[in-house]
Amino acid sequence: MSTAAAATEPGPAGRKIGPLYFHSYVPGRSLGVFFFSSFFAIASMNAIGVMQPYIFTEILKIPPNEQGSLAGNLTIIQEIVAFFMLSVVGAISDRSGRRTVFAAGFVLLAIGYCLYPLASGKVELAFFRLFLASGVACINAMLPAVANDYSMDVSRAKVIAATFILNGLGIASIPRLLGGLPNTFMDMGADPVWAGRFTLWCLSAFCLFLAGLIAWGLMPGAPAQQAVSRVPLKEQILVGFREGKNPRVGLAYVAAFVARADLAVVSTFLTLWLTQEGIAQGLSTGDAIKKATFFYVIIQVFALPWAPIWGYILDRVDRVAGLASAMVVAALGYVSLAFLDNPIGNGMYIAAALVAAGEMAANIASISLIGYEAPERARGAVIGVFSLCGAVGIAVVAFIGGWLFDNWKPVGPFVYMAASNALLFCLALGVLVVTGRQKVVKKPGGAAAVPH
């Protein structure tokens, strides 16, 4: 074998699908089910952000000037649940298997979507949100854990990029379909309240289907995790926090705080902002939601081409340097929204393209960094803490963003995220100074020889 081949090929121990390399212990069925579920997972979780303005306006009759704070408060409730669940969920998945926790997440989503449109007030809405929050916590911990379990280091970032492409394709199709369903049901004779209920009940049924598919098709976990069942759960949870002493793992935890908020600020506030803007410009609630959902989908479509680009880059550079570069792009994307004269006008296409590039860059960079640094036997626990940090970031952006939305400007949450990404860029530079730039040297077996 030539030197060049030895540097780039994972050898007989791996499974190759195009430019992606997976561990040989992963069955083809598990890969297929994982990629299929990746297509629907994020879209299924984010669907509440698409339908929430409709529920606020048509079912609960909440005044527009109260909707931003309510959306933020519901997101805070969700992230409080995630705060208490994520590190435990990750550790449990190390012990009992990824597929059990992954499938349970979709069952909880199904229950939440069944109950949510039946709420008669804010208190019931908050209670029903607990089921959605629990499902989101399980799925958010399992998506990166399974992706990193299956991938080899030689193409880890590219595998993460592939899952993000599938996430984006799902987000580009499902919310668009979901946003149009209320009008479809009303055309069939349903009133606005029942149209909203029928829409979310369709989603609930589909989540149950995904839960069954995952329970059937995913493998339990990586072989190195089999011995973890003998480790006390408390000790396994603490491993995730102890790993934070590694400056690069600690940076990844902070990156989760920012990058997960990048996603949440779009799903929580973008459709709400654009829906209100559309209504203010004379559109009906249904048409305003369709317009808002259209631009939400546009962001996901614009994000797709960036996934393979960042996957290629991050597998070839120091991952902390890659993260720093991603933060520059993300900061520019969010600050561009502050310069729009008409948020539902043609200028939004340019801003959406910039936001899409930054959102994709931040998330692939952070997940590939933690996936590379996390030890395999405790990957679920470490990624659980990583996801917990993301939950805190979402709660913070929900609280600050909700206040800024109602009391300053609807673009306020996005200005906050621009500043957060800029600060993370500075922190990444500091970690580079402390740890030094590490050159990634790929071994014949596909692992990257980067000192820890």
Image: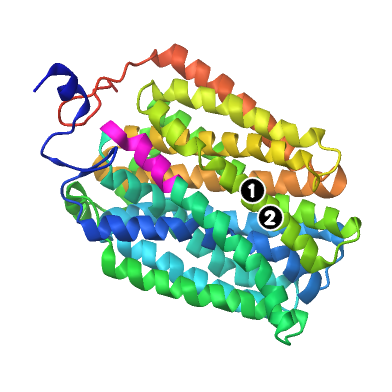
> Which image quarter holds the N terminus?
top left
- 435 versus 186 height, above or below: above
> Which label sits on residue 443?
none
Q: Are marks 2 and 1 in contact (CB under 8 Å)?
A: yes
As rendered, which of 196 and 70 lies closer to the eye?
196
Q: How many marks?
A: 2
Q: Is residue 38 left or right of residue 341?
A: left
User: Can residue 72 be seen from the camera position used here?
Assistant: no
Residue in the picture at 77% in, 76% down:
59
Q: Nearer the viewer, residue 311 or 420?
A: 311
Q: Is residue 215 above or below residue 281?
A: below
**Residue 109 placement (x, y as % from top left):** 51, 69
Q: Which amino acid type is shown beneath numbered disc 2?
A: Phe
Q: Is residue 398 above or below residue 325?
A: below
Residue 445: x percent and y percent?
Answer: 15, 31
| Coordinates of residue 216 in the picture (x, y in percent) | 28, 70
Q: How is the image coloured?
A: rainbow
The amino acid type of the residue labelled 1 equals: Ile
Please check the rendered image and state whether residue 162 is part of the magenta-colored stretch, yes or no. Answer: yes
Q: Is residue 124 left or right of residue 238?
A: right
Q: Residue at 32% across / 65% down in the picture?
A: 100
Residue drawn at the location 29% of the way across and 23% of the way down? 452
Residue 255 to residue 422: above or below? below
Residue behind mark 2? 294
As for residue 406 lying within the magenta part, the answer is no
Q: Secondary structure at mark 1?
A: helix
Magenta segment, which residues? Answer: 154-164
Residue under pointer 1? 298
Nearer the observer, 110 or 311: 311
Within-10-Å neighbours for mark 2: few <14, some 14–19, many 20+: some
Q: Is residue 438 visible?
A: yes
* Residue 449, quarter of picture: top left
